[in-house]
Image: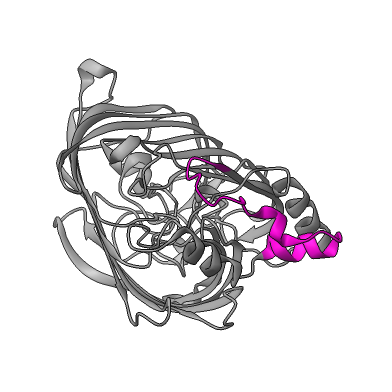
Amino acid sequence: MREISGIHPIAKRNIRKTKPICIIFLVSFIMKQPVFGQNPEHNQKNDSSVDRASNVRHQMDLIDIGYRIIGKNPEMRFDSTWKKPVRLHISGSPTPAYSLTTGFAANVAGNIAFYLSHDLDGNISSILISPIYTQKMQIIVPIQTSIWTKGNKYYAYGDWRFLKYPEKTYGLGGYTSASDATALDYDYFRFYQFFLRKLKNNIYGGIGYEFEDHWNIKELNVPAGTHTDFDKYGFSPKSVSSGFALNILLDTRRNSINPEGGFYGNMVFRQNLVALASDHNSETLLIDLRKYFRVSHNSNNTLCFWSYNWLTLSGNPPYLDLPSNGWDTYSNTGRGYAQSRFRSKSMVDLEGEFRFGILNNGLLGGVVFGNAESYSEISKNRFEVIEPAIGAGIRIKFNKFSKTNICIDYAFGKGGSNGIFTNLGEVF
């Protein structure tokens, strides 16, 4: 669920190689689709159609390269009028992958980006689909949706997943080590769906429903007489969390795929109820804050900060539904560590990243980043240990119209933990 992050949460992809034939296949798939007639991050109110077209024409992406490989002119991608923001663009690619959690994986990543608004103020909508089969016989089928209606009056987003997912768990709290790992196997279905309405300017409020079902849960190869943290917390071969949630959102970004400025703040209060089929009554609070500073008007270099806080306010959610790294919507928290490396009743995560261009044509960029997490200790209900990580990566322009990048990062955590982490679209 997570390391193959953009390609998908759950298998976050630590890509080792993508062969040229995969890129050619990718390009041939994308070329069949219509494209945007506007730059989703630009201030289109003040720029002419000609200026916007010129800005994108001076950029290069993998699709342009694919056009040239097969002898076609990349200018064919442009709408001659540049006046049709309601256009669909589909990006798709088979991608070999590798992650700490999944081993090698076969993945098909698809990103659909589009506008539902004819005016120039509408936010870009997106759908990410990325089915995966891994070396460790994991099956991952994630779908993430982010839909903005005309004039950004309504916003609907969802996180739907099915997994058959052998993985490791390391116990609860911050004092665990890699040697504490025990093997798990389970099936998992997640359905998160929210509907929000604009309250004022960029502020939205609404409700949603969150449902999580784990079944066929097994602890594997546990030595006789050993009581794992899962056992102590309350092992069960099946668990369900089900509840309604209140959602407040402030989002001033123009493009959630690759923000170059703005602020994102999301607070979700969830109440799981036995009356809705939950195993136990419990309450959780999620606070997700992101801020983007464009360093200069003459470049797209951006300084970004992310604070992700997942807190249990009352009750005892099932073990596999407790806060854990790599289980956010796009499975990106905690680069430097395998998914599920840390788990407890509450977590706080702070990440920072500097994104910069390398080539003037936008095809290649880079990042440096750092993050630090802490998990509450079950017996004391307080944070005592910090789990830091640092890393760097490259960005390859996948689609210049939606500003989608292929992101390849290498991160180092403590205790010798390290690995490649990849995404289709920025980490946050």
Magenta highlight on residue 82: yes
Identity of the residue drawn at 57% across and 82% down: 360
Q: Nearer the viewer, residue 340 or 248?
A: 248
Relative to 277, say whether 311 is above or below: below
| Residue 40, image x, y percentages | 43, 56
Q: On the image, which quarter does residue 209 sit in?
A: top left
In this view of the protein, can residue 349 be seen by the observer? no
| Residue 347, image x, y percentages | 25, 57
Magenta highlight on residue 204: no
Give the quarter of the figure containing the C terminus. Answer: bottom left
| Residue 424, image x, y percentages | 55, 57
Left or right relative to 404: residue 256: left
Identity of the residue drawn at 44% across and 51% down: 330
In this view of the protein, can residue 139 be seen by the observer? yes
Q: Nearer the viewer, residue 284 or 355?
A: 355
| Residue 29, image x, y percentages | 74, 46
Relative to 411, say whether 226 is above or below: above
Left or right relative to 427: residue 13: right
Left or right relative to 383: residue 223: right
Left or right relative to 142: residue 276: left
Q: How many marks?
A: 0
Q: Nearer the viewer, residue 160 or 162?
A: 160
Q: Which region of the structure is painted magenta?
A: 62-88
Identity of the residue drawn at 39% across and 54% down: 256
